[in-house]
Image (tube, grey):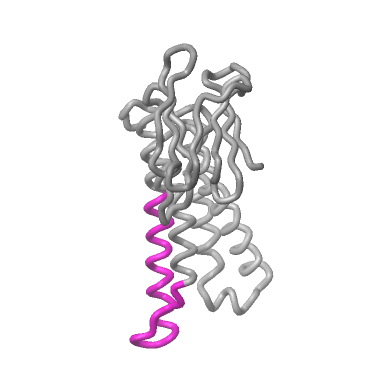
Amino acid sequence: MPSVKYALEAGTPKNLEISWERGYKNTTVTLDGHTVGAFTDLKDLKGGREFRLPDGSRLTVNLNQSLAGTELRVLRNGQAVAGAANDPVERWKAGYMMALFLGVFNIALGAIAEFGKVDFLLQLGVGVFSLAFGAALLLLGVIAWKAKSTIAQALAVLLFAADGILGVIFLMQMAGSGSVPSPAGIIVRIFLLIPMVRAVSALNEINGGKLR
C-alpha cells in the first residue's frame, strides 16, 4: 500500500501519514497512528476535505490532477505542510535541480560534439553554443539554489524557452519550408520547463514577494 509521511512542523517527527490502495481507493489519513480522516475513492480525494486535528488545527487534503502531473496537496491551517507536493520549498528545489541538470547535460553534450567532432551533433547546432547555453543555465541554477533568487530562476525559464523556440525554427529551416518538427520533442521540453516555472512562483512566496 503506497503511503507518504510528513511532519506537521519542521524538526518534528513525521507522524502524519497518508496511505491509499491502487487507484487512490480507501485513502486514509492518520496522525500518530490514529485515523483523522478518510476518502473512499479517487473522485472523493480530488474533491478534497478538511479534518480537525487533536490540537484544533485544520488539515486539508486533496489530489490535484492536471497536464503538469498529479499532486497530493496537504495544508495545515491554509499553509502547505513541509515536504508536500504543494510545499513552495519542494517546488523551489525541483526547479533549481532541473536547471542544474539541464545545464550539466548541455555542457556534456556540447563537449562531446565539439571535442569529439561528432558531425551529426555539429550539424544540429550542438557544440560551442550548447557549451555556452549549458554554462549559463548551470550558473542561473546555482544562483537560484544558493541565493534563492527569483530573478535567476525566471531567467533560467526564459533562457530554456528561448532555446526551444530557436531550436524549432532551426529544425524547420533544416527540414525545408513548411515542415513542422515532431511534437514529441516539444512536449518533452514543456514538461522539463514546468518545474522551473513553478519554482518562480514558489520563490516569490518564499521570499515574501520580494525580488532578489
The spot of residue 130 in percent (x, y) is 53, 62
- Farthest residue, direction right: 116
Quarter of the image with the C terminus in it: top left
Which residue lies at the image location 47% right of the left edge and 12% below the top edge? 55
Q: Is 22 placed left or right of 48 in the picture?
A: right
Residue at the spot x=41%, y=72% of the render?
168
Q: Residue at x 51, y 24 (%)?
A: 36
Q: Where is 113 relative to 64, above or below?
A: below
Which region is colored magenta?
Answer: 156-183
User: Can you give x and y, in whole percent of width and height, for residue 117 in the image?
Assistant: 65, 74
Q: Please state if 9 lies on the left or on the right of 205 as rendered.
A: right
Q: Nearer the viewer, residue 33 or 152?
A: 33
Q: Nearer the viewer, residue 192 or 34?
A: 34
* Residue 47 placement: quadrant: top left
Q: Nearer the viewer, residue 113 or 42?
A: 42
Residue 94 is situated, as x and y percent measured from the top left of the image, at 52, 42
The image shows residue 186, relative to residue 175, as above or below, that is: above
Question: In this rendering, is residue 122 above or below 42?
Answer: below
Q: Is residue 154 above or below residue 76?
A: below
Q: Residue at x 38, y 74 (%)?
A: 169
Residue extending furthest toward the front: 40
- Apparent side of residue 192 relative to residue 161 in the rendered image (left or right): right
| Closer to us: 56 or 96 | 56
Q: Is residue 181 magenta?
A: yes
The quarter of the image holding the N terminus is: top right
In the picture provided, is 3 more to the left or to the right than 90? Answer: right
